[in-house]
Image (tube, rainbow, N blue to C red):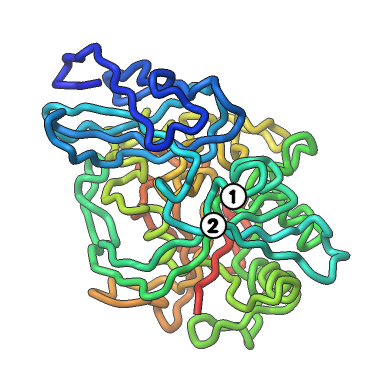
């Protein structure tokens, strides 16, 4: 399907990378709107979840197709809508499918079984070669409640910081080259209230409606709660980046002890942005910059924010308001959800200024504030961009402050 200015070529292009259980003619682009929303329907044949990639090219004569979006673990007869930025004067799109997630997502998954709760002496850890190998699919609610799913992110180099093109009136600042020399794992979803409850035995979140709390992100937790001291005070023995220790009674302390894995922690700020971007250099990891300084339909697809349910909430509201159920919006190309909006996410680092070209940065040696990224449900669109930085005192507990787990490999 081609888009050229305001003109559309009414043509569907069908393709499959593997055709096991699929008829290529069943997989087709149904529509492409002026806002760049491409809609396709997954095949009715077969019962297994498939993985899809939206690709584009500027010429049908060319054999070079560029990936625009990857969508993992989708069942049969589903309508899938994706924002696909049209960055060329003429663009052709196709959708390709595979049962093999490695075709689209070059990473392994790790699943931690939290179902034993606080009484468990150990939490089993299982590794999978790709999304297709994860039992019942990565997006199943079990991985938002009783199990914690994390994806392996490949090491690499990227340009960190804000671009002047991110949104209208963006100044652009702090651009610098960062190299991450080690692979790391990071949560596919923000840690949810049920996962926190199973590890810590309490429900600290403000949005605690019993009908909806389980799959909502945990919030109202401080940096100290997560890795230093559940009494919400400084543990002088725990002091990133001077050391990587955590308090034994903190969330990370319990996770380390019961899995036997000492690397669990918050992500560094550079790991967070690298994972969020997943190869993009735009304000949103869907491949778009924003056209508004408040509400923006492109943010609607990327995460929960003020104008798609974030305003007008009550403490007992359903997930249609305030924080959304994790995984409700589009993932990025690495299969990570909710890195724009929903809740702010704590990072390891003290607040610091642009360090210049650097490898494996750990943030400032000391400061007064720790870093949060991603924006929250009550923010306007630009404040949820890939590069926006926030700083809080580490003891702050906020109804829009949460986190996702991470762990750097040796």
Q: Secondary structure at mark 2?
A: loop
User: Going 62% across and 32% down the picture, which residue do you hit?
Assistant: 313
Residue at the farthest front position: 20
Q: Is 80 rendered above or below residue 210? A: above
Q: Secondary structure at mark 1?
A: helix
Residue position for label 1:
133
Q: Is residue 268 left or right of residue 278?
A: right
Residue position for label 2:
129
Mark 1 surroundings within 10 Å by alpha-carbon count, few (fewer than 14), some (14 through 19), many (20 or more): some
Q: Is residue 316 left or right of residue 311?
A: right
Q: Are marks 1 and 2 in contact (CB under 8 Å)?
A: yes
**In the rendered image, which quarter is residue 84 located in?**
top left
User: Going 41% across and 39% down the picture, which residue do you hit?
Assistant: 380
Residue 150 image offset from top left, x and y in percent = 57, 58
Residue 178 image offset from top left, x and y in percent = 29, 70
User: Going 28% across and 75% down the picture, which residue do you hit?
Assistant: 355
Q: Is 387 rendered above or below residue 123? A: above
Q: Which quadrant is home to the N terminus?
A: top left
The answer to whether residue 183 is seen in the rendering is yes
């Amino acid at each position: 399907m081609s888009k050229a200015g305001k003109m559309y070529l009414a043509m569907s292009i069908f393709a499959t990378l593997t055709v096991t259980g699929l008829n290529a003619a069943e997989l087709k682009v149904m529509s492409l709107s002026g806002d760049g929303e491409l809609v396709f329907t997954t095949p009715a044949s077969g019962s297994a979840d498939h993985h899809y990639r939206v690709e584009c090219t500027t010429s049908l004569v060319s054999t070079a197709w560029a990936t625009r979006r990857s969508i993992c673990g989708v069942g049969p007869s589903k309508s899938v809508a994706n924002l696909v930025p049209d960055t060329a004067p003429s663009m052709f799109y196709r959708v390709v499918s595979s049962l093999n997630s490695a075709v689209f997502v070059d990473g392994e998954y790790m699943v931690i079984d939290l179902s034993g709760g606080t009484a468990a002496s150990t939490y089993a850890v299982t590794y999978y070669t790709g999304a297709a190998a994860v039992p019942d699919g990565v997006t199943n609610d079990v991985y938002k409640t009783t199990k914690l799913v994390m994806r392996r992110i490949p090491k690499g180099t990227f340009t960190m910081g804000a671009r002047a093109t991110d949104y209208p009136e963006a100044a652009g600042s702090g651009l610098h080259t960062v190299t991450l020399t080690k692979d790391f794992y990071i949560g596919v979803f923000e840690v949810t209230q049920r996962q926190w409850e199973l590890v810590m035995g309490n429900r600290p979140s403000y949005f605690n409606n019993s009908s909806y709390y389980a799959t909502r992100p945990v919030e109202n937790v401080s940096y100290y709660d997560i890795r230093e001291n559940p009494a919400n005070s400084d543990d002088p023995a725990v002091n990133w980046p001077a050391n990587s220790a955590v308090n034994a009674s903190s969330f990370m302390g319990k996770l380390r002890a019961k899995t036997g894995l000492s690397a669990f922690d918050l992500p560094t700020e550079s790991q967070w942005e690298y994972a969020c971007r997943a190869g993009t250099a735009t304000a949103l990891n869907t491949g778009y910059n924003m056209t508004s300084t408040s509400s923006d339909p492109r943010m609607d697809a990327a995460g929960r924010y003020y104008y798609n349910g974030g305003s007008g909430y009550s403490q007992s509201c359903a997930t249609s308001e305030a924080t959304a159920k994790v995984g409700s919006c589009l993932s990025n190309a690495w299969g990570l959800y909710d890195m724009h909006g929903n809740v702010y996410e704590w990072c390891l680092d003290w607040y610091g200024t642009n360090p210049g070209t650097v490898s494996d940065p750990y943030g400032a040696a000391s400061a007064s504030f720790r870093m949060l990224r991603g924006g929250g449900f009550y923010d306007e669109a630009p404040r949820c961009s890939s590069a926006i930085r926030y700083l809080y005192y580490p003891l702050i507990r906020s109804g829009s402050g949460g986190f996702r787990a991470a762990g750097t490999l040796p």
